[in-house]
Amino acid sequence: MVSFKNVVGHKDVTKYISNAVSENRVSHAYIINGERGSGKKMLANLFAMTLLCEKQEPDPCNECHSCRQAESGNHPDIIRIIHEKPNTISVDDIREQVNNTINVKPYQGPYKIYIIPEADKMTPQAQNALLKTIEEPPHYAVIFLLTENAELLLPTINSRCVMLKLRNIKDTLIKKYLMEKMEVPDYKADVCTAFARGNVGRAIMLANSEHFNEIREEAVQLLKYIQEMEISEIVNAVNHITAYKLEISDYLDIIMIWFRDVLLYKATKEIDKVVFKDQIQYIKERAKRSSYEGIEIIIESLDKAKARLKANVNFELVMELLFLTIKEN
């Protein structure tokens, strides 16, 4: 069942949408801006379903013919713009799929709705073509521009649309969703929530990812025993993690969260806020061994490693230097 009540967070946005529908104050164009996985498509689909729902209430009924069509992706009055080039929405895409069809009245509902994912990929020519439609739209037309970077849209587009910004969601809400709705164990929910940084879509993706679990286990095994490892073993460990080269940012983030746990436990002796609760024995041991200065050096070295890898410095050299810094501190 699809409903605004099921949306995790974004209460200000869902309240705005419900009020706009119930008070008949629907705009002709909206920008839904938020990072990948923040829920842009879900909210646009819910908004569209609500506008076309035959019961005309501020939440889709999920029962009428229109709602069932919308949920299955087959509603004739909901048009989703597609583009063949992966990084570009061309002027022809906009003309053919929006401008040339928008004056055809809705087939069955009161609105004709256009959803443009990745709207920031529109070329300036495509945006100018869309601008003409946004300036003088038919009364039944509603256009949703979904974007991660609203600042890349022309100021003239931004000024003619209602902006709905999707902000980061509280960790407590994300963890609750993972544990209650997805039945994710407590310790795993903590790690996924810490990684998600307020993005519920990313948290869900990580919770479902076996590959992420592999990377986590690989990093944890290294961190548990690195201070006893010989130089040759560290070199072997670096060679082993080249398999995770594409996910190295996640790998380094796991190490970062581990040492934040170490620092937190060292400073407070509290376990409640530790992310790696299932590894608390090793967190405690590391907190005893490492000084505050040593932990700070490790955290700084993680930031440096990320920057060097982005600058295409030799992978093996960067990781060997990082692991030696972790071992020595």
Image (cartoon, rainbow, N blue to C red):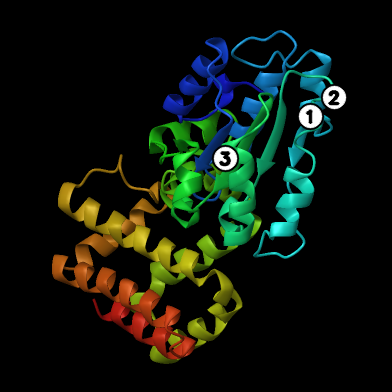
Dot 3, how many residues are within 10 Å of its Cα: few (below 14), some (14-19), or many (20+)?
many
Q: Position of residue 325 (x, y in %)?
A: 29, 81
Q: Identify which residue is drawn at 57% across, 34% down.
A: 29
CA gap between label 3 and label 2 equals: 25 Å
In this rendering, position of residue 159 left or right of residue 147 = left
Check disc 1 and report the residue beneath it.
77
Callout 3, which amino acid?
Lys
Q: Identify which residue is drawn at 48% across, 38% down.
A: 186
Which tag is nearer the camera, tag 3 or tag 2? 2
Q: Identify which residue is drawn at 59% across, 53% down.
A: 127
Check disc 2 and report the residue beneath it.
107
Callout 2, which amino acid?
Tyr
In this rendering, position of residue 177 left or right of residue 103 = left
For the N terminus, which image quadrant? Answer: top right
Check disc 3 and report the residue beneath it.
40
Callout 1, which amino acid?
Asp
Question: Can the viewer see residue 28?
Answer: yes
